[in-house]
Amino acid sequence: MQNQAAAKKNSRISTKDLVTTGLLTAMVLVATMFINIRLPISINGGLIHMGNVVLFLSAFVFGKKKAMIAGAFGMGMFDLLAGWTTWAPFTFVIRGVMGYVIGSIAYTGGKNGNNILYNFLGIIVAGFFMIGGYYLTEVILYGNWLAPATSIPGNLLQLFFGCLSLFIAPVIKKAIQYTGGN
């Protein structure tokens, strides 16, 4: 009976975790919605946005679970609110997996998101998933195997800009440590 009570207590989500995750989700949404450039190079449109920076920062600073939720819900809501509704379920899965993968790799071996090489490796691995995921999404949505290739340069550019998070994360971690947070 005591083990069940302890397990139940440990499985609860703290108010702090809930608020942090909500704020990260809102930040991903805002960065995606308001800091973006529409790409003219892809047949099906495309967008470069700073939501990736916030998603990657979420993974480096707060770990895989918060990043997964922030990426899935933040960018999924963007698709719903910005008229990309058919993309929303795909984005939800792709961005959620990206946050989880980056956070998992960044926290491998006790690195706690503090090792720039592990963080970069997380971006690379998640980037392959993103590019492949959005390629397959376009194949499903548009029924063409060739046209989705035009989106790959834009996706690579998104990952490139997302790498800004590699340089911002240590500053944020120090600020959190300085204020006694996290």
Image (spheres, rainbow, N blue to C red):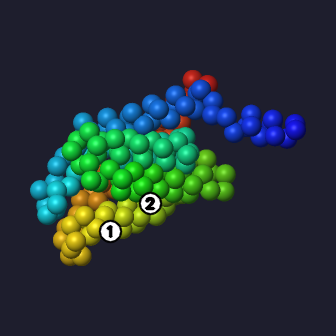
Q: Which residue is at the far right?
A: 1
- Reading the image, the residue beneath label 2 is 126
Q: Quadrant of the C terminus?
A: top right
Residue at the location (67% across, 34% down)? 12
| Residue nearest the viewer, comparing 5 with 114 | 5
Name, please, the residue furthest toward the left. Answer: 40
Q: Residues within 10 Å of mark 1 (few under 14, many from 20)?
A: some
Q: Observer-nearest residue: 56 or 163?
A: 56
**In the depicted view, which residue is nearer to us: 155 or 10?**
10
Rendering quarter of residue 44: bottom left
Residue at the disc numbered 1 = 136
Secondary structure type for disc 2: helix
Of the numbered discs 2 and 1, the one sitting upstream in the chain is 2
Number of other residues with Cα within 10 Å of mark 2, as a class: few under 14, some 14 to 19, many 20 or more: many
Give the number of the disc on residue 50.
none
> Which amino acid type corresponds to the residue marked 2 in the rendered image?
Ala
Give the distance between the C-alpha atoms of the residues marked 2 and 1, in whole angstroms. Answer: 15 Å
Picture coordinates of residue 21, whole percent (x, y) = 50, 35
- Give the farthest residue toward the bottom: 145
Question: Which residue is at 41% across, 42% downward?
Answer: 73
- Assign a secondary structure to mark 1: helix
The picture places residue 130, in percent across and down from the top left corner, at: 37, 61
Q: Residue at x 45, y 51 (%)?
A: 96
